[in-house]
Every structure is written in structure tokens, then in C-alpha cells.
């Protein structure tokens, strides 16, 4: 395409974004994000076919402006970490929210498969959890402390061990996105079924209430964070499979960068899960029931707000600037 035709074909969208940047036009977060993608595509095209043209310089400036509009506030907080966790991450999770929804849906599908399998096959729990775990837990249930298996070792040692394990699982989920997201899906299948088997097994042996207290005090952050880490893996896979109008490698670079940021955002929740398991969960049978459920509800409310509500609030704020 000749440069004049390229400019004539696309100038309306460029002028439209200039209107948004000057606060003369208001758009929804979705419209602004889509316009940003179109501008980035035009920049890539111009860099390829008109590398020394003034239109390329213009689009480069416009792309920077659109990026700032989508991912940053005009008045940035002085704390870089604050900006990252309460501005950049919410906007990225808003942009990629469909992968978070997909991750939740897939997890619960596998979870219910695990429940059905356990209730319909007496040997399924042993296949998933292992004979040693089942036998020891049955002994603990008979002795009156169903969660005793989780109470061994020191508080600090448990915290370190659990954090190391959970972080490695999360990292594997994220990196498995490099295999077109298939590896990430495998980890979700395995972990979702395992969680379901835990719950079904304790329910079958009249210890369901004890398992709720013993598992979900720390498991709320742990499992929710795992689902978000899986979503980050899907983002990488999608960036490879569905590059859109971008070159595949460019789409991949953007996907990895944004997925990595989302993965980083789960680390504080992974730390909190390990702290709760190392210092709180082991005392759940001695704690008031109200306190146990207060911790679970607070954990669920806080992480749900961060990943499911705050992104819409931040995106709306950017759209109204």
C-alpha cells in the first residue's frame, strides 16, 4: 500500500485517539484498549514499509500515548510497587480477563470430575493421594484429629517448605504456557482433581467440616492464586496461537511480558498462603469456628476483589480521565 493511501485509510482512528488523549472524547475501557491495539498494529506496519517516514515518527508518539492511557495514570503514585500492583496489574487483568474466566471454568469442571470420580470409585482417592496418605489420614480420623498429618514440623520449616512447593507449582503453570497452554492445562487438571478428591474423601469419612477448616484457611489464597497463574500460562499460549495482525514473535513477546507481570502479582498471595498454613492452619481445631471462617471469608473476599473487581474499577477510572 502506498503511504498516502495508508494515511488516508487510518487517519480517522488516529484523530479519534487524539481526541481521547485531550479529554475531548470519552470511551469505554474496551474501546480504548481496542484502539490501542489498532494503533500498535499501524505502527508495526509503518515501521516495516515506511521506516524513515514522518508518519512512523507520528505513530510512535501516538503509540506511546495510547500505552500510557491504557496502562498508566497521568498522576502516578510515587511508590513504584504501588503503581505496579494497583494500576498496571489491574489493567492487565482487565485486558486478559477472559483467560482468567476460562481458567476458573476449566478448574471447576475438573474439580467436579474429581468429585464424581471419587464418589463413584472407591479406589480413586488412593490412586490420586496414595495409599500412605489415605491410611495415615484414616488413623488420624479415628483418633479424632483428621488434620494431624498437616501439623508436623516447625512453623517456620512448614512455611518455607510450603512456599517453595507452591511457588514451583505456580512457576510451572506459568512456564507451561510456552507449550501452547497445554502444559498449563495439565497442571490444572491434576491439581483441581486432587483438591476435589481431598474434599470428597473427608466428606465420605464424616470429617468434611474439619477439612474445610484445615484446608481452606490457607487453601483460599493458594488455589485462587494457582488459577490466576494458570491464566498467565494461557495468555502465553494464546499469544502464540492467536497473534492477530501482529507478527507471531511480536505477539509472543507482548504475551510473555504481560503474563509474567500477572504471575508476579500472585507471589504475595502465595506467601500469605504459606504463612497461614505454617502458623494458623495447624491450630484450626483449637480455634473458635467463627475465627476460622472469618479468615476464610476475608481471604476469599480480598483476593476476589483484587482480581475480579479492582480491574473494572481501575479500567473505568482510566476511561474517565
Image (spheres, rainbow, N blue to C red):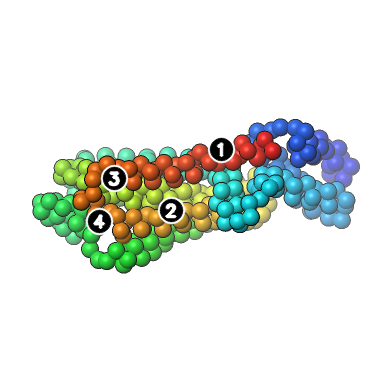
Quadrant housing residue 167:
bottom left
Going from N to C along the chain, the mark reached first, 4 or 2, is: 2
* Position in image of residue 173 (x %, y %): 45, 55
Whichever of callouts 3 and 2 sits on the residue coming sooner in the sequence is: 2
SS at circle 2: helix
Q: CA distance from mark 3 to mark 2?
A: 20 Å
- Specify few, some or many for label 2: CA neighbours under 10 Å numbering under 14, 14-19, or 20 or more: many
Q: Nearer the viewer, mark 3 or mark 1?
A: 3
Question: x%, y% of residue 177?
Answer: 50, 54
Q: Nearer the viewer, residue 200 or 87?
A: 87
**Residue drawn 70% across the image and 46% down it:** 74
Q: How far is disc 4 from disc 1 in space, using C-alphas?
A: 37 Å
Please name which of the two marks, 4 or 1, marks the residue nearer to the observer: 4
Residue ID at (79%, 53%):
47
- In the picture of the structure, the residue carrying the numbered disc 2 is 269
Q: Which disc number belongs to residue 57?
A: none
Among numbered discs 4 and 1, the one appearing first in the sequence: 4
Task: Check the image and name the residue furthest to the left.
Answer: 142
Q: Nearer the viewer, residue 86 or 70?
A: 86
Q: Are marks 1 and 2 in contact (CB under 8 Å)?
A: no
Q: Quadrant of the C terminus?
A: top right
State the residue position of label 1.
312
Q: CA distance from mark 3 to mark 1?
A: 31 Å
Q: Is residue 279 above or below residue 300?
A: below
- Is 49 displayed left or right of 243 in the figure? right
Please name the residue that numbered disc 3 is placed on: 291
Residue picked out by circle 4: 282
Amino acid at each position: 500500500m502506498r503511504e498516502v493511501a495508508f494515511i488516508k485509510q487510518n487517519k480517522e482512528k488516529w484523530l479519534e485517539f487524539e481526541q481521547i488523549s485531550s479529554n475531548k472524547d470519552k470511551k469505554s475501557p474496551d474501546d480504548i484498549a481496542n484502539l490501542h491495539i489498532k494503533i500498535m498494529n499501524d505502527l508495526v506496519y509503518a515501521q516495516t514499509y515506511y521506516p524513515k517516514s514522518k508518519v512512523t515518527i507520528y505513530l510512535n508518539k501516538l503509540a506511546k500515548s495510547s500505552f500510557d492511557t491504557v496502562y498508566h495514570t497521568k498522576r502516578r503514585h510515587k511508590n513504584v510497587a504501588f503503581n505496579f500492583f494497583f494500576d498496571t496489574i489491574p489493567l492487565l487483568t482487565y485486558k486478559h480477563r477472559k483467560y482468567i474466566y476460562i481458567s476458573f471454568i476449566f478448574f471447576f469442571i475438573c474439580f467436579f470430575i474429581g468429585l464424581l470420580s471419587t464418589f463413584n470409585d472407591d479406589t480413586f482417592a488412593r490412586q490420586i493421594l496414595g495409599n500412605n496418605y489415605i491410611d495415615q489420614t484414616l488413623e488420624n480420623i479415628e483418633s479424632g484429629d483428621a488434620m494431624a498429618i498437616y501439623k508436623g514440623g516447625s512453623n517456620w520449616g512448614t512455611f518455607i517448605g510450603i512456599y517453595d512447593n507452591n511457588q514451583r507449582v505456580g512457576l510451572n503453570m506459568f512456564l507451561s504456557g510456552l507449550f501452547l497452554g497445554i502444559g498449563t492445562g495439565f497442571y490444572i487438571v491434576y491439581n483441581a482433581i486432587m483438591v476435589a478428591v481431598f474434599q470428597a474423601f473427608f466428606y465420605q469419612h464424616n470429617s468434611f467440616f474439619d477439612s474445610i477448616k484445615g484446608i481452606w484457611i490457607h487453601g483460599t489464597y493458594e488455589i485462587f492464586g494457582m488459577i490466576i497463574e494458570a491464566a498467565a500460562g494461557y495468555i502465553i499460549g494464546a499469544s502464540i496461537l492467536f497473534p492477530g495482525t501482529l507478527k507471531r514473535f511480536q505477539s509472543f513477546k507482548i504475551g510473555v511480558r504481560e503474563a509474567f507481570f500477572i504471575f508476579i502479582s500472585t507471589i504475595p498471595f502465595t506467601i500469605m498462603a504459606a504463612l497461614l498454613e505454617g502458623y494458623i492452619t495447624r491450630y484450626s481445631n483449637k480455634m473458635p469456628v467463627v475465627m476460622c471462617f472469618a479468615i476464610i471469608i476475608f481471604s476469599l473476599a480480598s483476593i476476589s476483589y483484587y482480581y475480579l473487581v479492582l480491574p473494572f474499577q481501575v479500567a473505568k477510572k482510566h476511561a474517565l480521565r
